[in-house]
Amino acid sequence: MHPPLATPALPPSQPVFRDEVRALWALAWPILVGQLANIGMSVAAVAMSGHVSAQDLAGVSLGVSLWNIVIITLIGLLMSVNPTVAHHVGAQQLAQVPHVVRQALWKSLLLGLIATVVLQSTQLIFAWMTLEDHTRFVAQNFVLITSFGLPAYAAYRVLYGYSASINQTKPMMVVALLALALNVLLSWVLVFGHLGFAPIGGLGCAWATLVSVWFNLLGMLLWISRSAAHRSTYPFTHFEWPQRPMQVALFRLGLPIGLTFFAETSAFALIALLVARFGSAQVAAHQIALNFASLLFMVPMSLSVAVLTRVGQSLGAGDAQGARYRAWVGLGTAMVFATASALFTGVFGAQIAQFYTEDAAVLAVAIPLLFFAAVFQFSDSAQVVLSGAIRGYKVTRAPMLLHLTAFWLVSLPLGYVLGVAPDWAPWRPAAAMQATGFWIALVVALMVAALGLLVMLKVIADQRCADAASGVDGVLAADASGSASSPPQVH
């Protein structure tokens, strides 16, 4: 049973905390299952290729790194649909939602085609890198094959954001689980050569990913077309061309989010490319730790989407106090999970690494890296949920600048000094720390991002509540929902 579209008021009573956690989790858990299924495709790709050879594992790992940069940047660029729809839902302006979704789909078509060209162009990176021949072959062809799924993925993320923002999260869960099952089956058949197919190693994961991405889009379209819960906001009643005002608003809101996602994801992926100079074992170990950390990250990421929806709906309804309350409850919930995930990763690091590979050289590096993955659970969980809450306020530029600072001005320079120990660095370690140095820098960068976002949310939420008390909130709510004559307030 799905939560209703209406956003109830939050009376200042003690039971509200339990009610809010329950409502937040009702939104988040189907998103979580769907996210885990999506990341499970990468886990399956890395795990299966790791049981073929270290070169296949390294090649798939490098390909997955670039694929992740592009798709996560796409997610950010297209996330403008989430707060826009959530504000309309909170304001009970459901008739505005289909128009937003149709315009967002036009945006997704353009961005998906651009992303296809960009990902195909990244093959040139591998030509310049010092890699073993088979590793380079797998990496280049992985990005080439999977690039043809990007237009479908972009459209899927619009439908994903639309459905989540009207409190309908079950479709993403069911479709993603079916896509994961399809992906694992196809990978098993193609990687190892079953059911009469010849084994093609790591590239089997690429073909399985391509098919699964298109399956995701078709599954969401079918669900939405048949769902009674989507009927009042059904976006495919008629055709409309792109319209400049809405396209400008969506791009203005989505571009900073996309750059934010790019800053973080590209930093992680660039580290994989920098670590490649130390050999396949270092690359594979880095990817194992990153892949498992990404799996854990899906929980706070799902909470982030749920918090964005709850905060956006509250603001659309003119409830600034409720928006602030929901943001802090979401952060507290994320910290409870971070504690559990950090303990689990720290205690079972060796067993986690052995799930991915039996290569002794890779295990020797991966197990210590998983310790750092455990350490940054707190700051990583905090920063993603805080970011979701702030996006619910339609504030996107300041978080973008903060993430660019944390990952490009702190993480990468510090990681390079620690990991490579270049001669020109005055405070370099005695010997290059290789992948470990880069992971220490990641921990520092995530702490910078989390602390900055914490201060930012407090200032934004308190200011909105003060505006509400002084009678300004009605104007802001109208602007945010798009019903006023002026464009939505996008910071």
Image (spheres, rainbow, N blue to C red):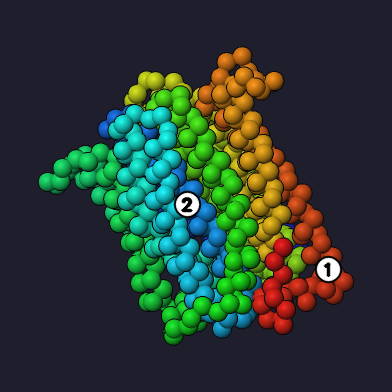
Residue for point 46% across, 60% down? 114
Amino acid type at circle 1 is Asp
Q: Mark 1 points at which residue?
A: 467
Image check: 80 left or right of 327?
A: left
Give percent across and percent down for residue 302. 54, 54
Figure check: 184 above or below 315: above
Viewer-closest of 469 and 46:
46
SS of the residue under disc 1: helix
Q: Which of marks 2 and 1 is in front?
A: 2
10 Å neighbourhood of mark 2: few (<14), some, or many (≥20)? many
Residue 323 is situated, as x and y percent measured from the top left of the image, at 71, 64
> Which percent across, then down, holds residue 471?
85, 75
- Is 99 located above or below residue 452 in the figure? below
Give the amino acid at mark 2: Val
- Closer to us: 321 or 267: 267
Q: Which residue is drawn at 69% across and 50% down?
A: 401
**Marks 2 and 1, Cα distance to the nearest angstrom?**
38 Å
Q: In which quarter of the image is the C terminus?
A: bottom right
- Disc 2 vs disc 1: Cβ atoms closer than 8 Å? no
Does residue 175 appear anywhere in the picture?
Answer: no
- Kindly identify which residue carries mark 2: 70
Q: Which type of secondary structure does the marked residue at label 2 adopt?
A: helix
Tell me which numbered mark, 2 or 1, is placed earlier along the sequence.
Answer: 2
Seen from the viewer's position, the closer of residues 171 and 42 is: 42
Image-quadrant location for residue 96:
bottom right
Residue 4, x across and y down, in percent: 55, 73
